[in-house]
Image (tube, coloured by chain):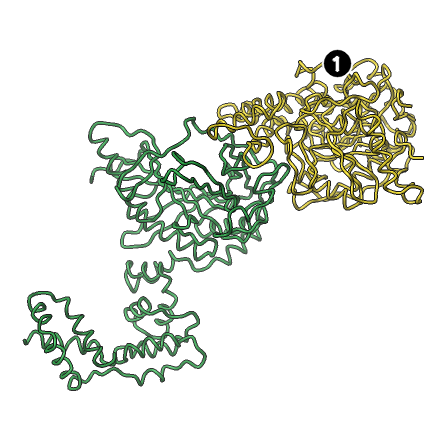
Chain colours: A yellow, B green
């Protein structure tokens, strides 16, 4: 009766409300699915008994959960059990959502494939030889494989949208400041945002409404307008821009470009006014800007992992040796790479040329987006230039890996929201379609995403599991 | 020494006495069990975020206004990155190029008044406290273990940086006394050096008198009283002059002042040069104090000590006015003067008697005016009762002291006769013994004699002997 592969969270809720199954029965069905398929996929770092009477949920392991080990995919946090709940975990609990477990992530959310996890890579349910994307590959693969009806991820430069695209899910990176970061293991504070990974846009809107809203514990949060569950099946009255630099960017696979082009045509058929637009500097400078700001903040955010108060500690003869050995053995290559990059970018004599310049570029990117949104309600593009790639294909080439986020990064830097929905297949693998709106335009994104989802009729269950 | 001029600037840290810490809601305060006033934020657990303490921000603005500073329309918290166990986040949240208070000056009144300008005052968080155990010295080197108490970590701290306007150790001490008095009266800090709620580092250099150059300076640390700060500056100034006059140069250094030996010893620092990699704290939004809040805080400023000293100096002279205000006796003094007590009389009464808050000064003034005729007990009792309901001077005015020489003379004679040794010593030049004789006579009369009359009588008799 509980088909975890097919059921949306909304349907699970209906089953619960009508009393057709108990919360325990539903929870057990997902646990059985995890039992059956997670050996292969490695989505979950650890499982939880899940208090509550509501819908099950999976949380990315950067989301702090009281009493449940939270490692952010890093050895340096192995054994760390938070004494407090993150605000989003507390809000989920308050709505009765039952924690199934914590999902795999690239270490400290640094990566685009989940291969940087200290606890082994996750695999894509559409093709287990391929990555599920990252950093939130565990959450995305779990939802795609029916191991959880929905999940939360976190996104710094594409870590919700890109894995959602590669796994055929709906993923929202909300407007910066709408969802509290309190209790989220920080990667880059001015960019990190938590958001939902779901099977449908309506599920996504609902979960967003659970977690969004001002939080006195996070000074960067704002008041959020009420979320509207989308109903409309057309795009009438919406002005949609197609940034040519994102459409024509180098490295977009032909199959991805085709699927996205068809989705753009569909937007017009559904009544939207579609026109080309331009974000030249955002696309050209977005990636370098991101790879200065994010590592700079990360180098500071990761300084607290020193072996003194919690987590992994290596023995040493004096303080410096404890620091060095702990951090050398505790961090994997990618955090080390970014700590070094970021430390360099902030150093005396280099600050102005690197971090300072990147902040100026950020202002340019924010303005460029604001100008485009004077003419358009939304802009659209591919979410990822490619479909899911083979495990190991980019592991030794950080720059190729960084390029996976070319299309998701500009809007992250601008602080505006983006929704990725599946728009078709290329080589038998899902292609993500990205909708980006101005700040606090989540309701518009949900409305457009929902109408497109209906019209596209994409089957979110991986073909090999049907 | 006359051809050299000291050039001194101070960096002052003031721990605010807010109820809670700078960026979390943990209680502040001295003396709790170690590591009991902590939470995920001040222990830097993963995901914890700072939230700025509104009271601490307002108090810093208050201090800035009292010191004549500009209050910034926009102030930014920065991260100052460095590794140390007392700094759990790996960075201290401080302010860098956009501090809350900019400029200002404190005019220090006196016979030789001077003014010390401020560069800035900013808000930051205190580090945790490290205790080094074993090894005997209490210092890090040689210790067996180091323990950390995070109770202090995250307590709000204001850092005040002065211009290099101080020209002598004495000026440094007087400036600090006045600044401390101002801070205490604003009600924002206990400002006690011995408890570490006030900490002062001094930047010291010298230059040929009359020149306006700024030469290489030494930084002096770990001085735990105003006196030692003065002595440390003095030692540094003397040493630098020696170096220059010996044809040498002064290299930039940090020293600890050792009061026991009056020596400057090199301060232990990390081997590497400091690069704190400051950048704007992304977890906090910039402070933008609203003009109406600043206006309210300005309107609420009390009558400040510097102004009061200047006022009282007109009648009393600068030194007494200074003593009166820095011991917080000036309110009582002013109240007595307002009731018609003479300035000198009011001054010595206010300085010598612990007048309680809420004293009835109209009645007390009557007692003060008659003081020379009253017994010591009567005065003490009157002061003690002066804040009680129904206090009237009449009760005490009746207790007049014995001023009748005819009554006192036999007692004086008896005391002198009973102490021939002391009388001999007095005649031999130990005039300080007069007080001893006065005391003996007072004892004989049960404190009821007028000490002034006794004094005169004794002098007369001793001269005649």
Residue A267 seen in the figure? no
What residue appears at the point 53 percent right and 49 percent down from the top-left corner?
Answer: B56
Which quarter of the image is occupied by the N terminus of chain A? top right
How many numbered marks does the figure carry?
1
Res A278 quadrant in image: top right
**Foreground pick, A302 / B60:** A302
- Tell which of A303 and A175 is nearer to you: A303
Rendered image quadrant of residue B201: top left
At horizontal 51% and vertical 47% (from top left) the residue drawn is: B34
Residue B163 locus on image (x, y percent): 38, 41
A58 over B289 or under it: above or below: above
Q: Residue A3: horizontal and vertical position, in percent?
A: 91, 32
Residue A172: x percent and y percent? 78, 32
Q: Is residue A47 left or right of residue B253?
A: right
Q: Is residue A452 above or below residue B109?
A: above
Crowding at dot 1, Cα within 10 Å, few <14 / some 14-19 / many 20+, comes out as few
Which corner quadrant holds the C terminus of chain A? top right
One can see residue A320 in this view: yes
| A428 left or right of A360 in image | right
Question: Residue under circle 1?
Answer: A251
Instruction: Give how far across and how far down residue A188 sits, in percent.
Output: 63, 31
Q: Chain of mark 1?
A: A
* Figure check: B77 above or below A376: below
Left or right, B329 with respect to B43, comes to left
Q: Secondary structure at mark 1?
A: loop
- Give the side of residue B465 with respect to residue B195, left or right: left
Image: A146 above or below B120: above
């Amino acid at each position: 009766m509980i088909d975890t592969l097919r059921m949306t969270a909304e349907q699970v809720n209906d089953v619960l409300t009508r009393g057709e199954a108990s919360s325990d029965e539903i929870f057990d069905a997902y646990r059985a699915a995890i039992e059956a398929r997670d050996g292969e996929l490695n989505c979950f770092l650890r499982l939880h008994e899940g208090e509550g009477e509501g819908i099950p949920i999976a949380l990315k392991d950067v989301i702090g959960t009281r009493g449940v080990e939270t490692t952010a995919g890093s050895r340096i946090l192995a054994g760390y059990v938070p004494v407090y709940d993150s605000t989003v975990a507390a809000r989920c609990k308050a709505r009765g959502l039952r924690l199934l477990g914590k999902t795999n992530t690239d270490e400290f959310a640094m990566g685009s494939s989940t291969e940087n996890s200290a606890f082994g890579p996750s695999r894509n349910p559409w093709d287990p030889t391929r990555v599920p994307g990252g950093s939130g590959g565990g959450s995305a693969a779990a939802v795609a494989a029916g191991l959880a009806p929905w999940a939360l991820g976190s996104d710094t430069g594409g870590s919700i949208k890109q894995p959602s695209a590669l796994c055929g899910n709906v993923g929202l990176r909300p407007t910066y400041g709408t969802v509290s970061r309190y209790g989220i293991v920080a990667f880059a504070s001015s960019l990190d945002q938590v958001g939902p990974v779901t099977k449908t846009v309506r599920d996504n809107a609902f979960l967003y409404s659970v977690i969004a809203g001002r939080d006195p514990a996070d000074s960067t949060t704002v008041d959020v307008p009420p979320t509207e569950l989308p109903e409309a099946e057309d795009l009438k009255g919406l002005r949609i821009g197609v940034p040519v630099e994102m459409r024509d960017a180098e490295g977009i696979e032909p199959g991805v470009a085709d699927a996205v082009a068809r989705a753009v045509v569909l937007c017009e058929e559904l009544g939207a006014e579609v026109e080309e637009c331009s974000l030249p500097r955002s696309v050209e400078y977005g990636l370098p800007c991101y790879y200065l700001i994010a590592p700079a903040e990360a180098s500071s955010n990761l300084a607290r992992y020193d072996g003194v108060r919690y987590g992994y500690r290596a023995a040493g003869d004096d303080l410096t040796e404890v620091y060095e050995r702990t951090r050398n053995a505790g961090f994997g290559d990618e955090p080390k790479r970014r700590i070094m990059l970021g430390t360099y970018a902030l150093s005396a004599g280099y600050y102005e040329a690197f971090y300072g310049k990147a902040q100026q570029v950020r202002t340019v990117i924010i303005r460029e987006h604001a100008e485009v949104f004077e003419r358009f309600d939304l802009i659209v593009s591919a979410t990822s230039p490619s479909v899911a790639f083979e495990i190991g294909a980019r592991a030794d080439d950080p720059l190729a890996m960084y390029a996976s986020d070319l299309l998701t990064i500009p809007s992250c830097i601008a602080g505006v929201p983006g929704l990725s929905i599946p728009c078709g297949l290329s080589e038998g693998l899902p292609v993500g379609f990205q909708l980006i709106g101005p700040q606090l335009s989540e309701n518009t994104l949900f409305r457009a995403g929902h109408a497109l989802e209906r019209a596209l009729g994409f089957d979110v269950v991986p073909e090999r599991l049907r | 020494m006359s051809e050299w001029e000291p050039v001194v600037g101070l960096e002052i840290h003031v721990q605010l006495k807010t109820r809670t810490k700078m960026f979390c809601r943990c209680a502040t305060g001295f003396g709790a069990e170690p590591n009991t006033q902590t939470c995920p934020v001040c222990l830097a657990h993963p995901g914890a975020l700072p939230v700025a303490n509104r009271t601490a921000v307002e108090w810093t603005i208050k201090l800035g206004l009292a010191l004549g500073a500009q209050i910034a329309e926009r102030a930014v918290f920065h991260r100052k990155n460095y590794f140390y166990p007392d700094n759990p986040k790996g960075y201290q949240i401080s302010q860098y190029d956009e501090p809350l208070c900019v400029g200002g000056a404190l005019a220090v009144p006196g016979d030789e008044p001077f003014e010390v300008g401020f560069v800035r005052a900013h808000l930051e968080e205190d580090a945790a406290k490290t205790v080094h155990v074993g090894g005997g010295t209490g210092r890090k080197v040689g210790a067996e273990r180091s323990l950390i108490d995070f109770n202090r970590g995250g307590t709000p701290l204001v850092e005040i940086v002065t211009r290099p306007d101080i020209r002598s150790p004495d000026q440094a001490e007087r400036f600090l006394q006045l600044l401390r008095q101002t801070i205490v009266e604003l009600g924002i800090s206990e400002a006690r050096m011995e408890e570490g709620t006030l900490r002062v580092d001094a930047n010291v250099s010298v230059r040929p008198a009359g020149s306006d150059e700024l030469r290489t300076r030494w930084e002096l640390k770990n001085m735990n009283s105003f006196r030692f700060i003065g002595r440390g500056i003095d030692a540094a100034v003397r040493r630098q002059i020696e170096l220059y006059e010996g044809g040498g140069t002064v290299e930039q250094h940090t020293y600890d002042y050792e009061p026991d030996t009056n020596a400057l010893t090199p301060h232990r620092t990390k081997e590497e040069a400091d690069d704190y990699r400051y950048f704007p704290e992304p977890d906090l939004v910039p402070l933008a104090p609203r003009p109406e809040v600043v206006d309210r805080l300005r309107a609420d400023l009390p009558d400040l000590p510097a102004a009061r000293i200047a006022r009282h100096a007109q009648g009393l002279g600068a030194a007494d006015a200074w003593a009166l205000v820095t011991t917080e006796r000036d309110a009582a003094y002013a109240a007595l003067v307002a009731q018609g007590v003479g300035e000198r009389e009011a001054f010595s009464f206010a300085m010598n008697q612990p007048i309680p808050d809420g004293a009835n000064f109209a009645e007390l003034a009557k007692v003060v005016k008659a003081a020379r005729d009253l017994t010591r007990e009567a005065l003490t009792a009157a002061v003690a009762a002066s804040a009680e309901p129904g206090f009237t001077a009449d009760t005490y005015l009746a207790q007049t002291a014995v001023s009748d020489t005819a009554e006192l003379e036999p007692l004086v004679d008896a005391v002198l006769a009973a102490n021939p040794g002391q009388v001999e010593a007095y005649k031999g030049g130990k005039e300080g013994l007069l007080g001893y004789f006065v005391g003996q006579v007072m004892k004989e009369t049960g404190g009821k004699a007028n000490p002034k009359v006794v004094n005169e009588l004794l002098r007369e008799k001793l001269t005649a002997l």
